[in-house]
Image: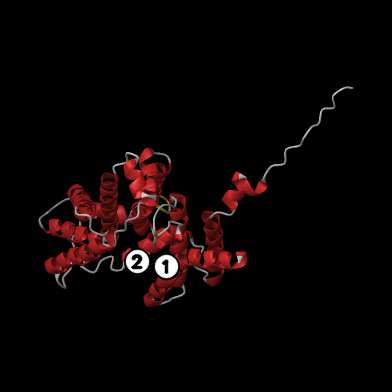
Amino acid sequence: MSDIAVQTRHVPDRLNSRAFRILRSWEALLLAVTVAIFIVNSFASPYFLNAWNLSDATFNFTEKAMIAFAMALLIISGEIDLSVAAIIALASTAMGLAVQYGAGTPELVAIGLAVGLLCGAFNAVFVTILGLPSIVVTIGTMSLFRGISYIILGDEAFRGYPSSFAWFGQGYIYWVFTVEMLLFVIIAVIYGVLLHKTNFGRAVYAIGNNPTGALFSGIRVQRVKFILFLLTGLMSGVAAICLTSRLGSTRPSIAQGMELEVVTMVVLGGVNILGGSGSIPGVVIAAFVMGLVTFGLGLLNVPGIVMSIFIGLLLIGVIALPRLWAIAAQSRKA
């Protein structure tokens, strides 16, 4: 008898395919929401589809997103920095003070970045060396940094920035493509590679999932966290340069409340507030979502306080959604 060869046909597991995983990811959902918001805004206001208006809409998120990229890595590692808006105020105040003594644009940029780094290092020392909770430390430094700005400025404002300094916050690279948007793209690529393609990024994920296990695996946990606080401070310095340049003046109330929007942007982007998971592409899409929403509401003359209420509700909803989803899944199993 001759052996009969039995051929089996391989049936691909579509539920586990890469394409299907992408389609059911949080980033895909955010992208769909972005498209929906864009369409709604285009019908809600006749001024929305104007190219120059859309270019101006990028100012609603680029400065916050620059900080959000660094904040995403920090939250993934299990820490948080609530002093980022106060760092902007202090860096802007330092730049404004330097202008009064005749500092030029290169000196102002150096001062903004240096103040951001120093503030980030200040937070890092208390968290990584003294072992204090980051949320407590940064709430304290949030008041400290902004308080210093109020002591220096009071009710006054620093003006008289060099005309060349305005390039960072008001300049255009090509037609409606702004300098801030270019910085946003460059920084997004840098942080995307850093988090997803390097050993440092893998260390950040490991620390966020199990800091003790990461320590016994040879990862210098405190050193990595120190660097992450430095990066967050540095990005706050970059945002301070762009925001001060765009406004053309410095007040102690500058960037007031921005820390809430940055955290909301990060969490909306799919970063777990408890650490251990998240992605830079998600934060990029979340930045566009928040930018389009706030710009659309602005075109409809919605008051700023209503936008603040919306952002607060959005933050609570995004944090509560995974928990509600888990409760619903457990109920179905029961």
Quarter of the image where the C terminus is located: bottom right
| Residue 260 marker | 2
Q: Is residue 136 visible?
A: yes
Q: Amino acid at mark 1?
A: Leu
Q: CA distance from mark 2 to mark 1?
A: 8 Å
Residue 291 lies in what quarter of the image?
bottom left
Q: In the rendered structure, which disc, 2 or 1, sits on the residue that comes first in sequence?
A: 2
The residue shown at (43%, 43%) is 196
The residue shown at (51%, 63%) is 49
Residue 166 in picture, x, y percent from top left:
27, 55
From the viewer's perspective, is 35 left or right of 236? right
Q: Is residue 56 visible?
A: no
Residue 211 in picture, x, y percent from top left:
34, 49
Q: Are marks 2 and 1 in contact (CB under 8 Å)?
A: yes
Q: Amino acid at mark 2?
A: Leu
> What is the total number of numbered labels drawn onto the structure image?
2
Work out whether residue 8 or residue 156 is closer to the camera in this orientation and state it.
Answer: 8
| Residue 315 marker | 1
Work out whether residue 125 or residue 283 is closer to the camera in this orientation and state it.
Answer: 125
